[in-house]
Image (cartoon, helix red, strand yellow):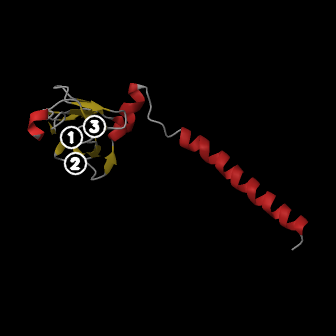
Amino acid sequence: MNAHRLSLAFHTLAAGLLGGLTLLVPALASAAVPDDPAQRAAVIGQPKTLLVQPQAIALTGPRSRVQLVITGQYEDGSSRDLTPFCTISSPEDLVVISEHAFLQPKKNGAGTLVIQAGTQTIRPAVTVMTWRSPSRSASAWM
């Protein structure tokens, strides 16, 4: 294959790949979580139950992190990841909650999270330990 044909083949392949990416990018953009409450409710539907993973939420140490996954189970037997559609709060203010359901410790203690999707609410236990350990005094090292 001469250099001209090779160059033409490369440019055709590159144009095809870039064209495919151009079509893919708008599709990804349309998969965003809707802000409109009516649209969110339509996506959530009517889950029969909500499950949270991990079931035992324990954060140990100031650098500890946990990501929650909340699954809705429906009457027809189907399951759906509802994590981005849930509202999550910490009434005891034990953890910082990111928009992607990552938890990080804020203070020591035990309490519950409140997780809501549609008409369903669950309250899993959460424990934060050794968020701030007492510092050792100089005499403890002697």
Q: Please name which of the two marks, 1 or 2, marks the residue nearer to the observer.
A: 1
Quarter holding residue 27: top right
Q: Could you give the CA–CA distance between mark 1 and mark 2, rounded to whole angstroms?
A: 18 Å
Give the residue type at disc 1.
Answer: Gly
* 53, above or below 29, in the image: below
* Residue 123 visible in the shown view: yes
SS of the residue at dot 3?
strand
Quadrant the C terminus occupies: top left
Question: Which label number is shown at residue 61?
Answer: 1
In-front residue for pair 98/142: 142
Check disc 3: other Cα within 10 Å, few if <14, some if 14-19, many if 20+.
many
> Looking at the picture, how far across and down is residue 74, in whole percent?
27, 46
In-front residue for pair 114/110: 110
- Does 57 sit left or right of 7 as displayed? left
* 93, above or below 43, in the image: above
Task: Name the residue rendered at 21%, 40% in the picture.
Answer: 61
Q: Earlier in the sequence, mark 1 or mark 2?
A: 2
> Looking at the picture, how far across and down is residue 131, in whole percent?
19, 35
* Residue 110 visible in the shown view: no
Q: Which residue is mark 3?
A: 103
**Badges 2 and 3: C-beta atoms under 8 Å apart?**
no
Q: Could you give the CA–CA distance between mark 2 and mark 3, rounded to whole angstroms?
A: 12 Å
> Looking at the picture, how far across and down is residue 66, in whole percent?
27, 43
Question: Which label number is shown at residue 86?
Answer: none
Quarter holding residue 117: top left
SS of the residue at dot 1?
loop
Q: Please name which of the two marks, 3 or 1, marks the residue nearer to the observer.
A: 1
Give the residue type at disc 2.
Answer: Pro
Q: Could you give the CA–CA distance between mark 3 and mark 1, rounded to whole angstroms?
A: 12 Å
Question: Which label number is shown at residue 54?
Answer: 2
